[in-house]
Amino acid sequence: MQVMNSGWTQIEEDIARKAFEIAYKRETSALIDSVRHKVSGLTEIDDMWQLHDFLSVKRHEVDGRYDYNLPTLVFIFAGLIKDGWITLNELEGLNADKIAKIIALTYM
Amino acid sequence: MQVMNSGWTQIEEDIARKAFEIAYKRETSALIDSVRHKVSGLTEIDDMWQLHDFLSVKRHEVDGRYDYNLPTLVFIFAGLIKDGWITLNELEGLNADKIAKIIALTYM
């Protein structure tokens, strides 16, 4: 087994990166749908400023979350599973230790 | 003629406040329409962050501009006329000195 960085094999890195991209695509697509929905019912400027506040929070969350970084990846995946953006099945191929850590973190 | 504050009569204040509210309504309605249009063509998250940046700028502009304050009102009205949110006709009833100042400021 070829171990590359921080105990992740190249195969694991490929799985992680793919899952990461899937989650990013799902979360950002859901955000776009959500903004479309909010805008369709928007009639007052105060609602627009609320949308602006909502986007400020979401941008901060998304920028913070999708910082691909191997040492923190188990924490990120636990969060993505908790929030429903990926399933554990989509991480199939990571070693048992990593999967166990991710599962444990989803209960925190 | 009853002069109230900073050389503005009550009648002038009523005209000013009404014009101010009309401009605010027009500018914010146009902004809502513009956001609807932008969102309708939005497919990528980077476009969404551009919309967020756009709203940040507009919110700053609108909050800054619509601060009803008698001493600066001639400057505000000149800006509103230049940007097409009110016409000079909608300020009819202000005294000749104020109208002359507003017209002069629109050329700056």
Image (cartoon, coloured by chain):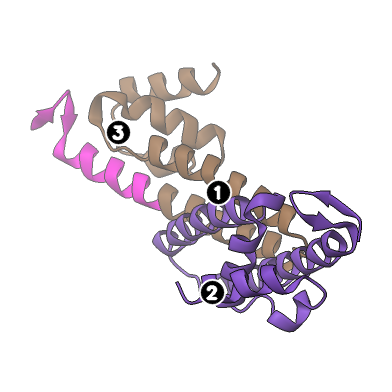
Chain colours: A brown, B purple
The stretch in magenta equals A1-22
Residue A96 lies, with reference to residue B41, above or below; the image says: above
Which amino acid, by three-letter code, is at mark 2? Ala
* Callout 2 touching callout 3 (CB < 8 Å): no
Give the residue number, with chain letter if any, for mark 1.
A55
User: At numbered mark 1, what does the secondary structure look like: helix, strand or loop?
Assistant: helix
Looking at the image, residue B1 sits to the left or right of residue B102; the answer is: right
Q: Amino acid at mark 1?
A: Leu
Q: Is residue B62 visible?
A: yes
At x 28%, y 38%, the residue is A68
Subunit bearing disc 3: A
For label 2, count other residues whose C-alpha is less than 10 Å away and answer few (under 14), some (14-19) or many (20+). Answer: few
| Label 2: which secondary element | helix
Q: Which of the two residues, A82 or A58, is positioned nearer the viewer here?
A: A58
Above/below status of B36 relative to A55: below
Is residue A61 on the magenta stretch? no
User: Which mark is on residue B104?
Assistant: 2
Chain to which the residue tagged by mark 2 belongs:
B
Q: Which of label 2 and label 3 is nearer to you?
A: 2
Question: Which disc, if any, is residue A100?
Answer: none
